[in-house]
Structures are given as structure tokens and as C-alpha cells.
Amino acid sequence: MSSYSENDDEALRRKRILSSKLYFDVSPSKVPLIYSASYDISFLGIEKLHPFDSSKWGRICRFLVSFGILDKGSIVEPLEASKDDLLVVHTELYLNSLKESSKVAMIVEVPPVALIPNCLVQQKVLFPFKKQVGGTVLAAKLAKERGWAINVGGGFHHCSAEKGGGFCVYADISLCIHFAFVQLNISRVMIIDLDAHQGNGHEMDFACDSRVYILDMYNPGIYPLDYEARNYINQKVEVKSGTLTEEYLQKLDEALEVAGRRFNPELVIYNAGTDILQGDPLGRLEISPEGIALRDEKVFRFAREKNIPIVMLTSGGYMKSSARVIADSIVNLSNKCLIETGGAPKSA
């Protein structure tokens, strides 16, 4: 009976993916860099009550345009994930729970959100997240076609099918992978999660799925302290509070070498959180801006040298300086010919 039910669920998931509008053809004149002005969260200043810079995504793009590396008209605008899209991974029960403002307030860690009428919460908080989910899902299609794609957003790695938390409302990484399984005929995906926090959401979602290999390099002494999810990490690299750039990059080199020997992916999802930056109040690591650019370069080189399509997500980062650090890193990727943005960068 349970196997019939599982087959039934899989058939429904497949049907939802095949009828989704999130995959669409993108003009070759566009660069595989995805962003929408709708990503940015701004409502009565409540967004300032969380350390996350919720205007970070727009600021990254403005830096890239001002550097001359990117033309505004070449950015790809994603669609919003519909309820049917979200049901590919999420339960109906979980999605219905988001109709309570208090539930959303807990997940985004901003208590006053509980006092806001839910219709406004849907529009001002959940809609931006649903657009970012659309961006992450589309990024896999673009990466398969172009070799790489960057969603200037997404990376909500604390959210799983049945549970949100840590400013992560929807499981965009899990959704992206399930869409890729069906639409791109891919059966081996590697998640390289280099956000300072453990990616417990995707770890729970792919706990017993041999098609997904998870390399997670995280600070074990900070949120989410999810010991159950740690059992499902294929390759765990723990970096303690205070870790400096040189040690961090050495550990990354070793980890990528091991991952490359153990697993041969058809797609890499790179969760590139910048909360490893020195001074970040939540990540508690001490990685320099140049170290972050080198980290991103190493991951892109790992994928591009093996000819594996790579999706980059910007994920966490809790300082105003994060946007500039990410923009500078993207400039570096372009300068090293690991991505092609079609612009000629001025000196950043």
C-alpha cells in the first residue's frame, strides 16, 4: 500500500513539474544572471528588525551595472512560484500554516510580522520569496544551457518540505533539484553549501536520496544545531568560530578534491552565503572579502573544469558590506573567464 502511495505521490509531483511555467525560454541576448526588483523586501521598516540586509539583492545588481560588467537589460526576470509549484516539495499543511502571520513571523525571525494582516504579509514578505524560488528553479535550466547561472537571491537552506526557519520560508534548493530531475533528465546533483550555517533544510529533504551528494562546510557552534540533519550530510567540513581565511581555503581545497573523487554530478548547486565574512555577527568566521572571491572562484573552477553546469545562490550574509563583496566576486569570476557577462568591467 505504501509503495502504491509513494508512486502516486511521485506521479503527482511529476505532473506538477511538467505543467509549471517556471521554466521558460530565455533569449540568448540575456545573461544567465537572474534577479527581479520584487526580490527586495521593504515594508514600514520592519525589515530592519532582522540582521539580514533584505535590499542586498538589488544592491548587488546595481553594483554590477555601475561597474559596467552587466547591462540592466540583460538580466533575466523570473516568474513567481505558484502554489502548485511549491507543492512539488512542500506539504499542503505547511503552506496553509503560512496563512497565519504569527507562523511567518517565527520563520523570518521578526516578531512584529505577527501583528500584520496576513494579506499584507503574503504581498510584502512571501511574494518576494516566491519570486526568488522561481529564480532558483529557472537557474538550473539556464545552467544546463549556458554552463552556469547565478540567482542573485535564493539559497533558503534552512527550509525543508514541512518546516521553515532561519529567514527561509520556501525550500528553493530542493525545488530546483526536483525540477531538474524531471525537466532536465538529470539524476546526480551535488550541493556545495558554503554558507556559515548548516543547510539542514535540504539535508532533511534528501536524507535517503542517493541522487544528491551534499558537501556542507559550516560552523558547528551556531544555528541551527540540527544534529539529526547532520547525519544526512555526505561530506561534513566543520569550521569553528574564528577560522581565518588561509585555513578556510585550505579546507575547501581538500574538500573539493574529495568530493570530486567520490561523486560525479551532472549539476552543482552552490550555496554561496557571505556570512563567513569577517565581522559577520551570525557566522562568526573571519574570512576576508578577497577570501570570499577566491572561495567562489575555486568552486566555479571545480565545476567548469569538469564541464558540470553550476548554479550559484547568494544565501546568507548579515552585513551591509555583503552586497559589494558578492558583486566584486562576480567581477572576479568574469575576469577569470569562469563566467561570461557580456560586459567589460571597469576597475571595481
Image (tube, helix red, strand yellow):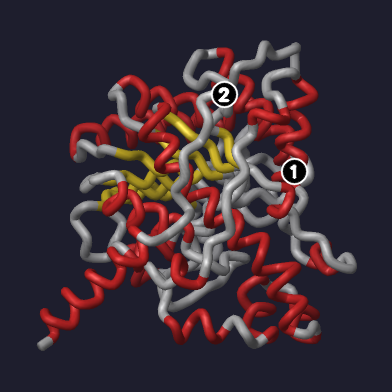
Question: Crowding at label 1, few (<14), some or many (≥20) Cα neighbours within 10 Å?
Answer: some
Q: Is residue 242 visible?
A: no
Which quadrant of the rendered structure holds the N terminus?
Answer: bottom left
The relative height of residue 106 versus residue 71 in the rendered view (above or below) is below
Is disc 1 placed on a helix, strand or loop?
Answer: helix
Q: Give the distance between the C-alpha atoms of the residues marked 2 and 1, in whole angstroms.
A: 21 Å
Q: In this figure, what is the number of numbered marks?
A: 2
Q: Amino acid at mark 1?
A: Gly
Res 217 label? none
Taking the image as shown, residue 152 lies to the left or right of residue 157, namely right
Residue behind mark 1: 58
Q: Which of 93/192 is in front?
A: 93
The residue under label 2 is 29
- Which quadrant holds residue 116? bottom right
Residue 19, how many percent across, how many down?
38, 61
- Residue drawn at (43%, 69%), measured in percent from left and top? 160
Q: Is residue 228 rendered to the left or right of residue 66? A: left
- In the image, residue 121 above or below residue 66: below
- Residue 331: x %, y % from top left: 63, 21
Give the residue drawn at x 64%, y 40%.
Answer: 277
Q: Which mark sits nearer the N-terminus, 2 or 1? A: 2
